[in-house]
Amino acid sequence: MKRLAVYCGSATPEDGRYMELAGEVGGALARRGIGVVYGGGRLGLMGAVARGALDAGGEVIGVIPEALANSEVANHDCTELHTVSGMHERKKLFTDLSDGFVTIPGGVGTMDELWEAMSWAQLGYHSNPVGLLNAFGFYDDLIAFNAKMAEVGFVRPAHQGILIADTKIGGLLDRMAAYEPHTPIFAMKADDL
């Protein structure tokens, strides 16, 4: 894994643990020689991830939509900063530039990015690991919901291992590095679906 897309919130929660965690994630990736591809913002957890990686000597590639870049939230300290027309182009570039995806705490936009990475993995648009950092139990309910979808039959057995969750960034990165790609829907026969 040379680069990972990091999905996270642009907000700054009152609980300082989240900002600290984001900085630790950026630093941990840089120390492993893994570049960060992220939303290109300088605020909230996004900015903390970038600062953590840059402070540790890492590569940081930001991908930000024009509307956000024009509102002066773009992080011009990035190694590279790509300005794109909108969110669809942004997420495609995340996928094109990355060897996997790490989701840390965030809101609606973060969930959109996570579910798209999982959906695209299921279909076969990419075969990269999709990691979820469940720090402070933030994603306990989401992990349970994903298990419920599998239990009911909405997530095929072949795809139940796509989401890789861990409570610590080191463990998560180790598990992502060991990820064995699954059989995507595009490669399945009708009887398998």
Image: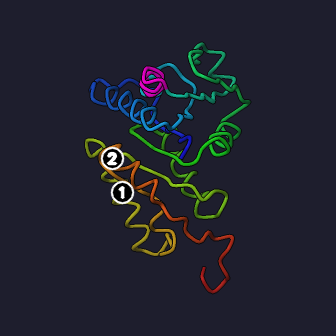
Check the image and name the residue furthest to the bottom.
191
The residue at 27%/29% (across/down) is: 17
Which amino acid lies under the numbered mark 2 shown in the image of this protein? Answer: Asn
Name which residue type carries label 1.
Answer: Ile
141 up-or-down from 77: above or below: below
Q: How is the image coloured?
A: rainbow
Residue 126, horizontal then vertical, whole percent: 63, 56
Residue positioned most to the top: 72
As for residue 8 lying within the magenta part, the answer is no
Left or right side of 183 for 108: left
Q: Tell me the residue that label 1 is attached to.
A: 143
Looking at the rendering, the stretch of residues picked out in magenta corresponds to 48-57
Q: Relative to residue 179, is residue 105 depicted above or below?
A: above
Task: Please rate how many residues cluster around mark 2, counting C-alpha atoms within 10 Å: few if below 14, some from 14 to 19, many from 20.
Answer: many
| In the image: residue 171, left or right of residue 33 | left
Residue of label 2: 134
Q: Specify which label sits upstream in the sequence, 1 or 2.
A: 2
User: Which is the main secondary structure of the residues drawn in magenta?
Assistant: helix
Residue 43 screen position, x and y as percent: 47, 20
Q: Are marks 1 and 2 in contact (CB under 8 Å)?
A: yes
In the picture as drawn, the residue positioned furthest to the right comes out as 85
Rendered residue at 64%/19% (across/down): 69
**Element assignment for label 2:** loop
From this view, report whether residue 167 is shown above or below residue 28: below
Q: List x then y, in percent, for residue 5.
A: 54, 40
Which image quarter: residue 152?
Answer: bottom left
Q: Nearest the camera: 35 or 164? A: 35
